[in-house]
């Protein structure tokens, strides 16, 4: 690592020029080709996927994106009055001519007669696209919105719902990123004593990686299914870890400069110590993210690959671009006051002192009590996890001033919340008797408790598939809706009779329910794979069995606390009004998987940074004497390692919390969930886990922290972060 740092420092112009060239080429290439994001998820073996396959193969107009134009009569008018119907009919005629629209079912047509509320004040038109939501461009969706709203007037209020409308209204994380970056800069200025250039370096390093990363994600969408949210989540993750990686390296560089090393040697030492931490922490994050491939759900492949790619780029820029920039900065990594003090007083020893040393000594003195109390607090925070309800956020969670939220509210008022999440009932048709059996099933389904209505069956153009729409009485995120899906599926074989093709229950809501079920089943395997791989990596890094074991358990507790808090806030509704979240509901099904991937890796950042510094102190001071001496040496190493890293870990955590928390000010519900989960987890992890629990447990365990069976020590490759020890092993 030191050779890499020396080379980047000496060839800094070449390194910076190469990064800038890559940046220009990838951004230009990405903009010229564009993106091809895909929001659909394939769930082989599920009932919802069977329905999708039948419709895609035989009923293309029914398998495309379906949006709703919601019409509300105002000012005491009736939906059938000429003052309402005339402008609506004119607007729907124009909508039918919008490029990409396959059909429009008007509430004034015979087919749409049931699309008018009983009180005659609310109605909706169904708009079917020729393509899926992912293929409907924002400009196409905007044309639909603008055309439909031409009916707005003194007696008519138009709102629209559907995935393509939601996609069009999504503003992206731009404001959140800006707020998070400014907040991070403020903390960096405080930590670095007002050294402006040093404070800007982590932001610049992360920014270079993020611009390249988002451009590559756009290109990635052409070769693998990648949802559009992948880019936003990658920015969220990359910004947090990128700034932290820069903070770790620059902090060590500044400390080395203050001890009297030259700028080149200080850079080499920083990369050879904190750089190793960045390398292995980044690898752990990537392992955790790519572990999602073990779930076998293609929707997550793009998410995990995009996030891992961004983390890898931030890691690479921190280990190459940042050392090169430190070569350009030279003495400017210190503030003027620090440079003046360095000139007047000379080198300063890098010793633990002040608040963080007092904190570390407090943990040492009260280690048993600290460990017990800290673990109890984390377990209590994690308890709501056992009542977590997975599902999918919908228009109810959109900003209250968005047209999708208004459409959701209006539909719920006129027809009930279930009209925002209808089911598609699909069956194959091989004979006339199959149609009769399907009609029998539809009649039975219509009488099922929790069902508002069921439309008559419609046969596909090729006559091979029949389709009906079922409207439940409860909304997409309701527990009763999940129960109803299962009830209808259980009803199908009994109602249609033997010898007839199966009836499949599909649509957005049943698909999301199946998605949640599949993830819940596969989550334990995924967690086991990630934990085992991370454990093996840490065994090779720290040459210990107990340290990786404690790290794995503590990381799982951090994730559990994050998910528990997430459920308490977003599902139970605790403190929603303080967090800019409109309504409570189920947690999006893929959020726990993604949170676990990222949090397990991020927790390892602090674990590796903390324990590697403790390990340095242990190897430098470990006596070749009695067990009692080793116990004292372990206490000294843990206390001083914690004291020397406390300020940086606190600053890194503060940056993470502000960056992730800034996504709560945006309007994207998924990013709000993800941002809150990450911010809260980092708070718990840095303050309780790394600040109290891990050091207390290492004090309690004693010299056994560093025990490694001889046979295993010979087998496992040496990836030690302790630079001196790694060099000695070679």
Image (tube, helix red, strand yellow):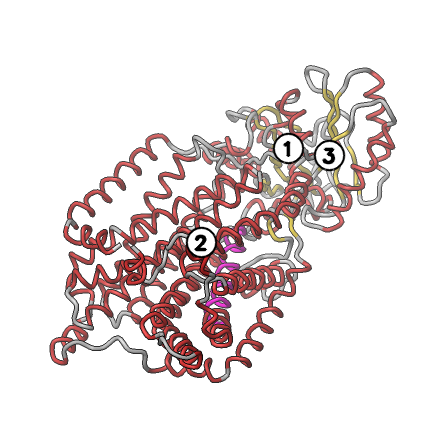
The quarter of the rendered structure image containing the N terminus is bottom left
| Residue drawn at 53 percent across, 63 percent down | 558
| Residue drawn at 18 percent across, 50 percent down | 7
Q: Measure how far apart labels 2 and 3 are at the Cα level.
A: 44 Å
Could you tell me residue 262's position as x and y percent? 14, 65
Q: Is residue 594 above or below residue 163?
A: below
Could you tell me residue 654's position as x and y percent? 40, 67
Mark carried by residue 505: 3
Asked if residue 155 shows in the view, the reply is: yes
**Location of residue 729 (image quadrant):** bottom left
What range of the chain is rendered magenta?
A: 669-688
Residue carrying label 1: 44
Crowding near pointer 3: few (<14 within 10 Å), some, many (20+)?
many
Could you tell me residue 244's position as x and y percent? 36, 60
| Badge 1 element | loop
Residue carrying label 2: 537
**Location of residue 463 (image quadrant):** top right
Mark in front: 1 vs 2: 2
Nearest the eye: 688 or 350: 350
Nearest the eye: 61 or 195: 195
| Badge 3 element | strand
Q: Is residue 257 magenta?
A: no
């Amino acid at each position: 690592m030191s050779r890499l740092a020396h080379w980047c420092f000496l060839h800094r112009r070449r390194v910076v020029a190469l990064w800038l060239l890559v940046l220009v080429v990838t951004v230009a290439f990405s903009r010229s080709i564009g993106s091809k994001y895909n929001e659909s998820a394939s769930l082989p073996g599920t009932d919802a996927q069977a329905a999708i396959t039948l419709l895609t193969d035989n009923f293309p107009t029914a398998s495309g994106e379906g949006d709703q134009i919601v019409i509300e009569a105002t000012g005491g008018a009736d939906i059938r009055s000429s003052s309402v119907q005339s402008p609506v009919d004119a607007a729907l005629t124009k909508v039918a001519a919008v490029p990409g629209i396959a059909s429009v079912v008007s509430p004034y047509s015979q087919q749409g007669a049931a699309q008018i509320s009983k009180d005659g004040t609310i109605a909706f038109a169904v708009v079917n696209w020729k393509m899926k939501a992912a293929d409907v461009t924002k400009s196409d969706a905007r044309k639909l919105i603008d055309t439909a709203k031409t009916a707005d007037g003194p007696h008519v209020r138009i709102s629209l719902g559907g995935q393509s409308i939601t996609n069009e209204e999504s503003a992206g994380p731009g404001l959140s990123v800006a707020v998070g970056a400014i907040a991070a800069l403020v903390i960096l200025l405080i930590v670095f004593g007002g050294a402006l250039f040093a404070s800007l370096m982590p932001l610049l390093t992360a920014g270079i990686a993020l611009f390249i990363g988002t451009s590559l994600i756009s290109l990635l969408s052409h070769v693998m299914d990648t949802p559009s949210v992948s880019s936003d989540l990658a920015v969220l993750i990359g910004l947090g870890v990128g700034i932290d990686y820069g903070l770790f390296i620059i902090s060590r560089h500044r400390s080395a400069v203050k001890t009297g090393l030259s700028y080149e040697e200080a850079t080499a030492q920083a990369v050879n110590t904190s750089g190793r931490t960045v390398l292995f922490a980044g690898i752990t994050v990537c392992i955790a993210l790519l572990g999602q491939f073990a779930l076998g759900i293609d929707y997550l492949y793009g998410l995990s690959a995009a996030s891992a790619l961004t983390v890898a780029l931030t890691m690479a820029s921190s280990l190459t671009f940042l050392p090169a920039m430190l070569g350009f900065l030279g003495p400017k990594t210190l503030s003027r006051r620090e440079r003046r003090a360095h000139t007047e007083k000379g080198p300063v020893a890098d010793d633990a002192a002040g608040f963080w040393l007092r904190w570390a000594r407090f943990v040492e003195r009260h280690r048993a009590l600290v460990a017990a109390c800290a673990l109890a607090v984390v377990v209590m925070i994690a308890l709501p996890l056992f009542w977590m309800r997975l599902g999918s956020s919908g228009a109810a969670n959109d900003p209250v001033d968005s047209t999708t939220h208004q459409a959701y509210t209006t539909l719920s008022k006129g027809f009930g919340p279930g009209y925002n999440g209808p089911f598609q009932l699909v069956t194959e048709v091989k004979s006339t008797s199959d149609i009769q059996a399907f009609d029998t099933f539809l009649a039975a389904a219509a009488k099922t408790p929790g069902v508002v209505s069921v439309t008559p069956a419609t046969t596909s153009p090729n006559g091979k598939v029949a389709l009906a729409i079922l409207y439940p009485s409860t909304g997409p995120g309701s527990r009763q809706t999940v129960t109803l899906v299962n009830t209808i599926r259980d009803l199908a074989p009994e109602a249609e009779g033997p010898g007839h093709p199966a009836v499949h229950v599909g649509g957005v809501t049943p698909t999301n329910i199946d998605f949640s079920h599949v993830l819940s089943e596969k989550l334990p395997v995924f967690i086991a794979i990630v934990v085992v791989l991370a454990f093996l990596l840490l065994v090779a890094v720290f040459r210990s069995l107990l340290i990786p074991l404690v790290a794995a358990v503590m990381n799982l507790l951090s994730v559990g606390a994050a998910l528990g808090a997430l459920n308490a806030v977003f599902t139970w509704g605790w403190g929603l009004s303080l967090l800019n979240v409109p309504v409570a509901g189920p947690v999006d099904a893929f959020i726990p998987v993604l949170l676990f991937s990222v949090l397990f890796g991020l927790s390892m950042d602090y674990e590796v940074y903390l324990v590697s510094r403790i390990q340095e102190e242990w190897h430098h001071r470990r006596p070749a004497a009695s067990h009692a001496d080793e116990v004292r040496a372990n206490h000294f190493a843990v206390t001083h390692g914690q004291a020397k890293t406390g300020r940086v870990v606190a600053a890194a955590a503060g940056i993470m919390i502000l960056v992730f928390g800034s996504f709560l000010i945006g309007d994207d519900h998924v990013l709000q969930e993800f941002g809150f989960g990450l911010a809260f987890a980092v708070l718990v992890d840095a303050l309780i886990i790394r600040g109290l629990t891990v050091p207390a447990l290492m004090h309690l365990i004693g010299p056994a922290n560093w025990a490694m069976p001889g046979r295993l020590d010979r087998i496992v490759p040496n990836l030690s972060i302790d630079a001196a020890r790694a060099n000695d092993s070679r």
